[in-house]
Image (cartoon, coloured by chain):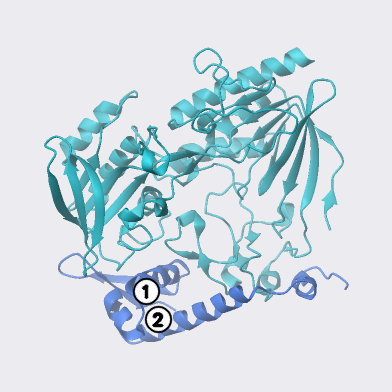
Chain colours: A blue, B cyan
Amino acid sequence: MEVVKGQTFRYRREKYEVPAEAKEQLKYYVKIKKAILDALKENELTIAQLSEILSLPKHEVVYYLMTLIKYGFVQVGAIDEMDEYYTYKRLK
Amino acid sequence: MHEARSEVEFDALVVGGGIAGCEAALNIANNGYTVLLVEKDLSIGGKMILLSKVFPTLDCGACITTPKVSEIARHTRITILTGSEVGSISESDNHRFKAGIVKHPRYVVDEDCTGCQLCEEACPVNVSDQYQFHLVGRKAAYIPFSIASPRIAAIDMENCTLCGACEKVCPTKCIDFTQEEEHWTVSVKTVVIATGFELFDPLGMPRYGFGLYKNVITSMQMERQLAPTRPFHTVLRPGDGKMPDRIAYVLCTGSRDTSVGNPICSQICCMYSIKQAQLLMGALPMADVTIYYIDIRAFGKGFNEFYEQALGMGVNFVKGKIGKIIEKDNGNLLLRYEDVSTGKLHEAEHDLVVLSVGVLPNKSMQSVFQDLSLLEDTYHFIKQDDPILNPARTSIEGVFVAGTATGPMDIPDSILSAGTASAEAISHIIQSQ
């Protein structure tokens, strides 16, 4: 197969299969990302509230939410009166 | 398909691009000799470049590492191979060594990447970020961290879905999925081993609940949380995103403990924990920080004053050995410990526990030397010919050792050790001419 600069992924795809785990991981991330961003569409929410809405363990919400902050999809909101939990809001 | 390179000659081979390896390479090169620096990771700078601050001066770790790292990167007599491993070293003719090196593909043409991160933005994949100690995600097309050297993207092929999004947006068309392993054979006059250390994995101590209880973290995870390029927006519990206010440090996790096979003191845990405690008191002024210790070993210059400063700031020190950690329903943690001074058992509740993990030997050089015997000490660190009189010499003439490859030590001692190793290496080069 001819290698074209800027499209070398096609060459790799011809020779090697994408690991099934990588595909599953991407699917899961896309699903969680959509669910978090949908949940934050209307309201600012805390991690506990997101966990309840998404039926997802809090530690997973923390991981994905912090990742979405890093990628610029989510912004940090206010902290509660006890200075314990922040709210988070959708940015994009 | 492997690309084989013809034999290349250098005066010195430095294995490991942490602070000791960088210092040794720089010293040798500044004396007029050519150096090949081989680093297994995607960036040089080792563990130090990931630190928030260093003790006891509280200088920014990145700020003092970066100038040195960039000096090495620009040095005309230093060739750096990142993402590469030394597979074999053997003796060859004329008192030289022959080394076989494998350069793993980065899938990016180094010279053409501008570090613009457009590939990173376009990549749809999210995987756990090893440079943030798995607290947050990163892309499959990524620059390891913001001050990585070289600041060049890499493709994580294990997690890449080959969608081509990165290639489409790359302005210099530098992404190259056709790359394969490169095999280098180099001839050198001397070798400096600066392979550093491994951190103890607390999964080996199930009674502390690491991995199971999400609010039990390692000291490197806390180090990242305190760094300017932190994974979270502030210091938070990974279990539920709560700002912690009762933080416990468990010293000697994986050190001075025969039950995990490491009876020796790691020499740095007391001080880095005290440093983190001070930084936490700055980041979370209302938080209580308690350090559970067996002994506080504040032996270096300015260390005891640093410890006293922490005491003055209100850090609570408890001479107690932690037996077990139990998680409560709200994610808080109960620490069962023996008060060493009274012999009585106590329980204390905290909302975040930091395990001050110890230093273990990096055993990656064990099988590298062929027909040559690189001796190890009792604890599997590289054996020094004489720790006092010849601390950089190993059991092989012409092979020297620097930094924590010889045993636990702090950053200033690593740099001093690298100075010794480079002086010995230069002397060996001169003698072999």
State the image coordinates of residue B275 (x, y, percent, origin top left). Answer: 31, 40
Q: Residue at x 75, y 63 (%)?
A: B176
In the rendered image of this protein, does residue B334 appear above or below residue B323? Answer: below
Query: For the residue carrying disc 2, how many other residues have a C-alpha within 10 Å: few (<14), some (14-19), or many (20+)?
Result: many
State the image coordinates of residue A10 (x, y, percent, origin top left). Answer: 77, 75
Mark nearer the viewer, 2 or 1: 1
- Distance from disc 2 to disc 1, alpha carbons, whole Å, reads 8 Å
Q: Looking at the figure, which quarter contains the C terminus of chain B? A: top right
Q: Residue at x 50, y 38 (%)?
A: B65
Chain of the residue on which disc 1 is drawn: A
Residue that badge 1 annotates: A61
Badge 1 element: helix
Query: For the residue carrying disc 1, how many other residues have a C-alpha within 10 Å: few (<14), some (14-19), or many (20+)?
Result: many
Q: Residue at x 20, y 46 (%)?
A: B290
Q: Residue at x 88, y 73 (%)?
A: A1
Please state if B77 lies on the left or on the right of B305 as rendered: right
Q: Nearer the viewer, residue B111 or A2?
A: A2
In the rendered image of this protein, does residue B88 appear above or below residue B172? Answer: above
State the image coordinates of residue B334 (x, y, percent, origin top left). Answer: 20, 57
Q: Nearer the viewer, residue B338 or B152?
A: B338
* Quarter residue B125 falls in: bottom right
Chain of the residue on which disc 2 is drawn: A
In the rendered image of this protein, does residue A40 appear above or below residue B158? Answer: below
Please state if B326 lies on the left or on the right of B49 as rendered: left
Q: Which mark is residue A36?
A: 2
Whichever of callouts 2 and 1 sits on the residue coming sooner in the sequence is 2
* Quarter residue B356 falls in: top left
